[in-house]
Image (cartoon, helix red, strand yellow):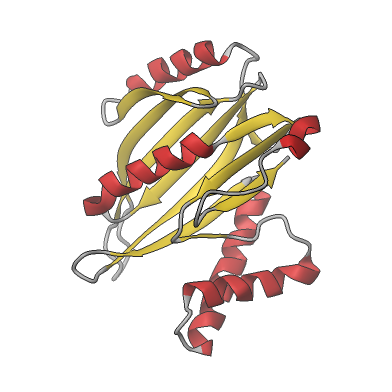
Amino acid sequence: MTTVPQNVSLALDTPEGFHELPLHLPPDVLDAALWELAEKIWPGGTDFQRETTAVVYSDLTATLAADNVLHASVAFYETEDGAASTAHLLVRAEAVDPEAPEIVAASFQETLSFDEHRSIARVDLPCGPAVLSLHATETEGEAILPALEFAHVELYVPSPVRGWLVVLALTTPCFADLPRYTGILRQIGESLVVRPAEQAEDLPETPAAGGVRAVFG
């Protein structure tokens, strides 16, 4: 079950190249935030490109906010051969049995391992044990639209505040850059801090160089 934890505060850093979508903002400031995002994505673009981008992300932001996504960001990079590489990151919280993080991690590792198309690994993050998952999906082509393949890299992180599982999911159509994005997700996971909401004010305020600090709760 995906929900919004009211008793948990999360903080994470995203590296340079990631642009956060303005989720959960009041309507009177949302349009300005979307335009600012479009300007970051198209620093040398036209007003038409920015306006189109703002409209697209306005619809996406509304959908993700309604689905209780805690954080969403999109990444744009340039490859060595000058091509564009992109990915998007979603952060959710799922309610789980209030067991110790080690037990929750072991349970999810076992459950995910039944999917023969997934690659599963146990990892240790500063905030505790986690499970790293890699798999691919393919969309069905329709009419003149071709089928698309996506690689999914996910971190399942049992919260030190028992009863919650934090899921960091990164999706990209750029399979050649999968090692890079796997490393980035691991880096983001290393920065993840989970605390009771009443301790949110104790979270570090200074992000890593080039990073973005996002706090939820």
Q: x%, y% of residue 27?
A: 77, 67
Q: Quadrant of the N terminus?
A: top right
Q: From the viewer's perspective, is residue 141 above or below residue 205? A: below
Q: Between residue 105 and residue 56, name the one nearer to us.
A: 105
Q: Quadrant of the C terminus?
A: top right
> Can I make out residue 62 in this image?
yes
Q: Is residue 147 left or right of residue 66?
A: left
> Can I make out residue 1 in this image?
no
Q: Between residue 69 and residue 74, name the one nearer to us.
A: 74
Which residue occupies 21% across, 53% down?
176
Which residue occupies 35% across, 53% down?
172
Q: Is residue 133 left or right of residue 6?
A: left
Q: Is residue 119 left or right of residue 188?
A: left
Q: x%, y% of residue 153?
A: 37, 40
Q: Between residue 27 and residue 184, name the one nearer to us.
A: 184
Q: x%, y% of residue 33?
A: 67, 69
